[in-house]
Amino acid sequence: VGGYIFVFVHTIEPTGCEEGAVRITDGLIENEGRLEVCVDGVWGSVCDDGWDKTDAHVACQQLGFSELEPEAYFGSKFGVSIGPIVYSNIKCGGWETSLDECAKTNYVNFTCPGDRIAGAFCLDGCRNGDIRLSGYNQFEGVVQICVDNVWGVISGESWTYGNSLVICRQLGYDKSRPDVLTYDTKNYNQRRAVFLSNVTCNGIESSLGDCDKILYPLNVAKQLAETTDEVAAVACISWTLEQGSSSMTILTTVTQSSESTSSVWPTLAAQNKSNDPYFIAFCILCGVVLLLLIIVFVMFGSKVRNYRKKRRLTSRPLPSIQLTNVDARYQTVNEDDDDDNDDLKN
């Protein structure tokens, strides 16, 4: 009996990735995931045959992570790629700068089941308790903290001004008046472990390590990366004075550098004045106060004028009555009456 054999071919469109580039993907955080390599413009995975920490070390170095020994994962811990399995039996010496330089078997010369995909966990070169800001510039952004050689973030729930003040102080902004910020994790495109929550600083501490907080182990912090809605952020802004000036100048941002952190009174850049929101608010406030003073002065002047007018009306003398002429007339009339009476008698 005749029959048909159907063969389904799944084609992968080139993504335009750079030949030989590597990435780790589908992990809970940026430090871990399934290893993928760009071959012929397509992202493909690596079979875990012969995969070890030395191979993972070269891949992590190529990605820009530290030289610290990474973890090598086996058995498709981070799932299966939609692309092909491009390499197997990778053997690196540890000195290579990319996986391209390592001995390996290309995809046309081996078979590998889908549950044998390699992965890696790469470490950051940082010290416990170190902090940094991840954002548009070096004085504003999401607060990142180093725990066990991994850069993570802090939950933004109940993040306070006192917390922000300590962060800026630890970063070297000694005379800082920070803005309290939080970033929605949906708009924060970095997958970071959430190491801290319920941070409570009084604002006088020298570092975040001196504040009350809840510190989570890495396995919990990675899970929190999936469920946390907001992460803590800060903008470090400083009140400063012009050198040699006795008057307060504008509120301005001071970039973190060896010069600005060691200087007690860093000089302000004049071009920042017109664009600084606090300076603009200060000018508006001065204008409002001046307007109120003018209104009070006008009202006071009006009341003074009304008072003086009333004084003039009440102090004006009454017109005098000239009784002399009246008495004379009265005397003349009486004399005439007396004459008439005399005539009648006669």
Image (cartoon, helix red, strand yellow):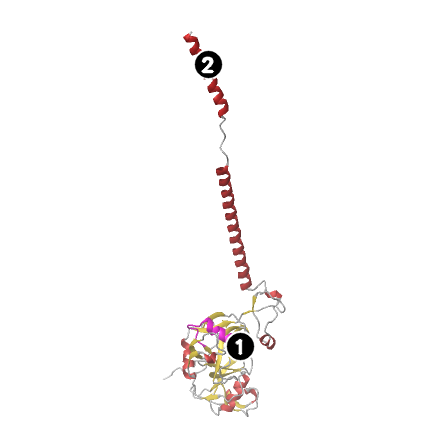
Query: Is residue 14 visible to the viewer in this orientation of the structure?
Result: no
Marks 1 and 2 sit apart, C-alpha to C-alpha, by: 118 Å
Query: Is residue 293 visible to the viewer in this orientation of the structure?
Result: yes
Residue 308 vertical position relative to residue 233 in the rendered view, above or below: above
Numbered tag placed on residue 304 in the rendering = none
Q: Quadrant of residue 154?
A: bottom left
Judge whether residue 159 is colored magenta. Answer: yes
Q: Position of residue 114 (x, y in %)?
A: 43, 86
Question: Could you tell me which secondary element the residue under label 2 belongs to?
Answer: helix
The residue identified by callout 1 is 171
Viewer-proximal residue among 68 and 128: 128
Viewer-proximal residue among 215 and 340: 340
Q: Position of residue 237 (x, y in %)?
A: 54, 70
User: Which residue does the image show at 51% across and 42% down from the upper left?
Assistant: 308
Viewer-proximal residue among 133 and 241: 241
The region drawn magenta spans: 154-170
The residue identified by callout 2 is 336
Question: Considering only order in the chain, which callout, 2 or 1, is on the residue closer to the N terminus?
Answer: 1
**Mark 1 closeness class: few <14, some 14–19, many ≥20 residues within 10 Å:** many
Viewer-proximal residue among 139 and 74: 139
Q: Amino acid at mark 1?
A: Leu
Judge whether residue 186 is colored magenta. Answer: no
Residue 5 vertical position relative to residue 320 in the rendered view, above or below: below
Q: Position of residue 128 (x, y in %)?
A: 49, 84
